[in-house]
């Protein structure tokens, strides 16, 4: 699915496109080899665990990970001869960690919690796998986040990296809360990690935190004009972490490259089942610091509708992750940018291995405990075609039961999405047991689809739904239309940024709309009155502004 989208964006850039196709094919080939060869891991050293007073070290001959005991904060990651990929200058609880932003509904003000564990439990320890659990149970104390937290870390034999996931739980009757953000954060060594890659088209040398501190803050603190960066070619650029956001559906791998020694640090998200608000919810990825984030839920780009509210003692339990922290390296003679291509290959291996068959939590079901939904979606729109139309490339998903379109705000359950093929056929595999509604939208057609019955997913079952028909809202023939109903505004007019406030990455870029300050360009283009669009005369690619913004 991700490749389809990227190829779409690159249409016309034939050279790059060909390269991408070749890369993808290599990835698939390599993946087949790895899948066939399960004896591979046995040729590597065993995974080992050392429990010390204040630390616990897990290593497998390739990577050493040190965590605080019993806090479960990642204090060190040794790899490729580097003593720590994380920044030693930061406090030990400020290098690699889970955190949550929450509030008491009746008390304005966010409370920030780093989910420090209070006890360590070794869940599994053998030559092939070590899994650790750091528990932070709720203590009924008033100012403590009323959640039981179980943070897990897994290292496998022969694997250059580690997995992490967490189980969040509240029992019936616990105090009301608002949860507004949950994530993992990694603060990497600035001396090493200067090149960031978020997608094929979004990669660059990044400014440092010091460059930002010496810069000029723009309309909000996250946006900084780099007035005096160490790397002089960054001078005059705008840096803003929001410029590197991605849709959930496009955020399966992102991270950083060190050129010396050539090493990569990647966050691989093998599934979006635990993310909130569906495939087109955007969130942060990596940004200047250097920082790499795994965002599980947040209010970014949506605001308070995405605050997870618990009222009247509502119970809840959800597993976030596992995500894979993948490390890679090449020799000094190789191009460090190949680390990105390798990270994408690893991403394919991880996504195709989902659901994983090794996490030990009873709350994480393996494939055989999950179900499958297969079917076909058609569109009935007699003003376009007398016959049913295939819902080509439709997005189809399961989310908690709700109204049509409610998946966009749904934030407590699991969601399972796929994209239909050209004929509208779809298969959603690895669905957790439960009761869902089936939702969809079809690029090119307005509105939202919802199947009129609940879907009850049972372990190992396949549900087949081959005659789904979507009737898009319509009162008669189309008289005129501005743009394409596809949940992006990219086809409209996106202005050039103010030349003194640019991010060079987005010059001549498909995601030009990510430039800073475009909201102010509207006033400059239309100083006296709002734009006027003449139906039949105007062209939406030139005459319709991509966003609805204020005119000063
Ligand atoms: C499997 O891995 C072993 C050890 O790394 C290797 O010797 C063997 O050639 C591999 N087999 C295949 C089919 O790739
Ligand atoms: C990893 O940790 C073990 C145990 O502390 C140590 O013996 C080994 O040298 C470490 N490896 C690296 C690469 O630092
Ligand atoms: C809690 O969430 C509700 C609903 O989203 C919101 O109206 C309220 O302002 C939030 N309270 C705090 C303290 O954030």
Image (cartoon, grey):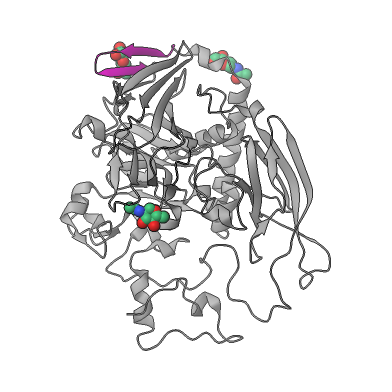
Q: How many marks?
A: 0
Where is residue 314 drawn, in percent x and y? 47, 41
Q: Is residue 183 above or below residue 84?
A: below
Give the magenta part as a residue range: 46-58
Say whether residue 50 is magenta. yes
Front residue (pair 259, 98)? 98
Where is residue 121 drawn, in percent x and y? 38, 17
Q: Is residue 483 above or below residue 44?
A: below
Magenta-drawn stretch, dominant element (helix, strand or loop): strand
Q: Quadrant of ligand 1?
A: top right
Q: At x 56% / y 28%, what residue is drawn?
A: 356
Front residue (pair 519, 346)? 519
Residue at the far bottom: name it. Answer: 528
Say whether residue 377 is magenta. no
Where is residue 417 drawn, in percent x and y? 61, 46
Where is residue 223 drawn, in percent x and y? 28, 59
Residue 104, visible in the rendered structure: yes
Q: Is residue 468 toward the left or the right of residue 214 in the image?
A: right
Q: At x 75% / y 39%, what residue is drawn?
A: 463
Q: Is residue 539 above or below residue 339?
A: below
Instruction: Identify the image quadrant of the C terminus.
Output: bottom left
């Amino acid at each position: 699915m991700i490749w389809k989208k990227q190829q779409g964006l690159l249409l016309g850039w034939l050279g790059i496109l060909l390269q991408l196709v070749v890369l993808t094919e290599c990835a698939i080939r390599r993946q087949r080899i790895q899948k066939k060869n399960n004896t591979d891991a046995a040729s590597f050293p065993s995974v080992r665990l050392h429990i010390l007073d204040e630390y616990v070290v897990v290593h497998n001959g390739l990577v050493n990970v040190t965590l605080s005991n019993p806090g479960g904060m990642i204090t060190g990651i040794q790899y490729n001869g580097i003593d720590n990929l994380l920044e030693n200058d930061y406090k030990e609880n400020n290098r690699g960690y889970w955190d949550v932003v929450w509030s008491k509904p009746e008390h304005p003000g966010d409370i920030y919690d780093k989910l420090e564990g209070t006890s360590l439990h070794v869940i599994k320890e053998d030559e092939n796998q070590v899994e650790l659990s750091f528990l932070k149970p709720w203590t009924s104390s008033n100012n403590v986040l009323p959640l039981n937290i179980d943070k897990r870390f897994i290292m496998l034999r022969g694997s250059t990296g580690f997995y992490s996931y967490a189980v969040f739980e509240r029992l019936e009757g616990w105090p009301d809360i608002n949860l507004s953000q949950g994530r993992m954060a990694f603060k990497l060594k600035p001396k090493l990690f200067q090149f960031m890659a978020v997608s094929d088209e979004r990669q660059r040398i990044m400014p440092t935190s010091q460059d930002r501190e010496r810069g000029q803050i723009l309309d909000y603190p996250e946006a900084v004009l780099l007035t005096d960066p160490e790397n002089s070619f960054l001078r005059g650029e705008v840096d803003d972490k929001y410029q590197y956001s991605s849709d959930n559906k496009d955020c399966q791998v992102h991270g950083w490259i060190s050129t010396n020694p050539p090493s990569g640090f990647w966050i691989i998200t093998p599934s979006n089942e635990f993310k909130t608000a569906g495939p087109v919810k955007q969130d942060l990825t990596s940004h200047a610091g250097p920082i790499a984030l795994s965002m599980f839920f947040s209010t970014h780009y949506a605001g308070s509708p995405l605050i997870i509210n618990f009222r009247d003692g509502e119970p809840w339990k959800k597993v976030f992750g596992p995500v894979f922290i993948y490390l890679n390296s090449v020799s000094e003679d190789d191009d460090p940018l190949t680390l990105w291509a390798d990270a994408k290959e690893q991403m394919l291996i991880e996504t195709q291995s989902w659901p994983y068959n090794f996490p030990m939590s009873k709350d994480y079901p393996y494939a055989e405990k999950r179900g499958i939904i297969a079917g076909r979606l058609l569109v009935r729109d007699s003003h376009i075609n007398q016959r049913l139309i295939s819902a080509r490339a439709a997005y189809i998903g399961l989310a908690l039961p709700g109204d049509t379109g409610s998946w966009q705000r749904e934030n407590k359950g699991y969601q399972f999405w796929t994209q239909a093929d050209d004929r509208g056929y779809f298969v959603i595999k690895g669905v957790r047991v439960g009761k869902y509604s089936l939702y969809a939208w079809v690029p090119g057609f307005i509105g939202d689809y919802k199947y009129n019955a609940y879907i009850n997913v049972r372990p190992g079952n396949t549900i087949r739904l081959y005659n789904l028909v979507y009737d898009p809202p319509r009162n008669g023939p189309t008289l005129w239309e501005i743009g394409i109903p596809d949940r992006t505004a990219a086809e409209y007019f996106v202005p050039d940024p103010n030349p003194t406030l640019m991010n060079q990455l987005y010059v001549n870029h498909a995601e030009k709309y990510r430039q800073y300050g475009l909201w102010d360009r509207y006033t400059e283009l239309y100083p006296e009155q709002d734009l006027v669009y003449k139906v039949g005369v105007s062209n939406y690619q030139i005459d319709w502004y991509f966003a609805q913004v204020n005119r000063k």
